[in-house]
Structure formats: C-alpha cells, structure tokens
Image (tube, rainbow, N blue to C red):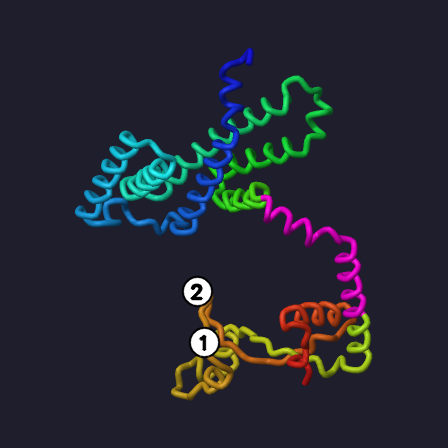
Amino acid sequence: KKQPMLSAISENMSLWSRLLFLCSLVCNLILAGSYPFDDDPEPGDLVSRQVSLLVWASVLAVLAVVVASPRALWGYILAGLVIIRLILSHGAEPTLLLLGTVNVVIKAIHLVSIMGNKGTFTKSFQQILTDTELIYHVFYFVFCILGLFKPYAYSILLLDVVYREETLFNVIQSVTRNGWSIILTAALALILIYLFSIIAFVFFRDDFEMSVTKLIPVDNIVAASPSCEAGLGEECPMESAKGSITTIGQQAYITEEETEKVCTSLRMCIITTLNHGLRNGGGIGDLLR
C-alpha cells in the first residue's frame, strides 16, 4: 500500500494474464497465416477499397459502442478489428512486431504484479531462485523477447494454457503421476527391440532389403557412350532405361531404383527395426524380402 502504482498493478494480475494469452494467440494466428513474410502481398493489394472502408466503419461503430456501453466483449471485438485494420494497412510483419512489443510490455507488467503479490522484493536472492513459479514467468518473458527476433518462439507461449487451466494441468498430472512406470515400460520396449534385432541379424540379415533411389549424373552416362556424345545419331537407351531425369541446381541426374541390404551390422539392424517399427506401428514385414 505504500507504493500505489505497484499496488494497482498487482491487483489486476488476472487481467494481465488474460491479455497475455490473447495477445500470444493472435500473434500465432498471424504467424500461421502469413509466414514467411517474403510472400506477403503489398498492403494495398490485399482487399478492395470497399472492404477497407467497411473495416474502418466497423472499427468506428464498435468504438462508439465501447464508449457508450463499456464491456469486455466489445473491447475484445474492437481490438480484433484494429488488428485486422493494421494488417490491411501495413501488412502482417509490422503488425506482428507491434503485437510482440505489446506482449513484452504486458508480460513485464504481469511479472511485476506477480513479484508484488509474492513479496519478491523483500526476499533474499536464494529464496527467489527457489521460487519455481517466478522462474516460469521469467522464462515466459524471455520467450516474449525472443519472439521479436524469431517469430517461431511465439508458439511456445501457447503452452501457457496448461498453466492457466487447472483442468488441463490435472489431466497431465494424472498421466505423468506414474512416470517411473512409464520409463520402465519404455525400457522394456527397447530391450525387446534389441533382442529382436539380434535375432534378425543372426537369421534374417540377408532378407532385410530396402528400395532406394540412386542419382547418376548425366555426364557419366553420356561419357560411357562415345557415339552418343559425338552426336552420331545413336540412341542412348541408358537414360530412359534407368529412370526419369531429375535436375538439382545446374546438374541433371538420372534416378535409378535399387535395393540395398539394411541389416549389414547389428547397429544397422537396431536402427532399422526401431525406425520402421515405430513408423509402421510395430510391423517391419515390408522390409523382408
């Protein structure tokens, strides 16, 4: 109470938390719909003049409603329309940068409110380091700052829904409560895969085959046929026989399907069994000849 500003900030901690989540959600919606920003069209090419005027009219109408009857719902609608107007006027990237900056400011205020409610300013440094809730919010603040430089960081902020919603938190706790049992079950699965890999290596090593695509440079094939290289009219059947031509950069390649043995060592047997077993739901019969 001796610090009125800190007291006012601390009293509205739930408001800051709600605004943070909504801002992070909007940032991710813009990121998912517009990234990469190099493909973002010019702001003037996004919509016609009529649609632009309609958005402006909607913003002014909702603003009048908010002034006449201030409610949280109308405030959220107004904020959404303003964000749409910013995207149409300036593009997605500047709007995302602006929202990211707002997100950092709100999180800083939220962090101060948490520290005020928990009495962090009167605690020792050792007590602060053992406060897991405060450390969580500090990491959240760090990811808010990272989002200004790497927008992918905003996706991590969505995981805050687990912390916010007690129902989700309880579900995760019930699933991970028997964590040691889950780890032992996974260890048993790895042991069984290891035993099966040994059996496969001893008895079925020659039966594990995989189809691979081999790239052969076109120059090598042309050089193998001098008359074809000299342009004497000889047909070069090697190109059509071996497969289609694929261009990578400035080099042309001919694709050729081959089969290779994938269980030549115990290590490769373990990797193959684990890889294809997980991808095929446990079945690796397609690899057997």
> Quick check: 289 left or right of 17?
right
How many numbered callouts?
2
Tell me which residue sits at (49%, 73%) in the image. 253
Residue 180 highlighted magenta (yes or no): yes
Please tell me how crowded label 2 is: few (under 14), some (14-19), or many (20+) other residues with Cα within 10 Å.
Answer: few
The relative height of residue 76 versus residue 124 in the rendered view (above or below) is: below
Residue type, mark 1 in image: Ile
Q: Position of residue 66 (x, y in %)?
A: 30, 33
In the foreground, 229 or 140: 140
Secondary element at image label 1: strand
Tell me which residue sits at (35%, 44%) in the image.
Answer: 92
Q: Amino acid at mark 2?
A: Gln
Q: Which residues are magenta?
A: 166-194
Residue underneath mark 1:
245
Task: Using the rendered view, name the quadrant where residue 94 is placed.
Answer: top left
Q: Residue at x 52, y 29 (%)?
A: 13
Question: Between disc 2 and disc 1, whose residue precedes?
Answer: 1
Front-lying residue, 24 or 171: 171
Q: Which residue in the rendered view is the most extreme toward the front?
A: 69
Residue at the left extreme, as displayed: 50
For marks 2 and 1, give the CA distance: 13 Å
Residue 151 location in percent, x, y?
47, 43
> Label 2, on which residue?
250
Question: Are the residues at dot 2 and dot 1 in contact (C-beta closer than 8 Å)?
Answer: no
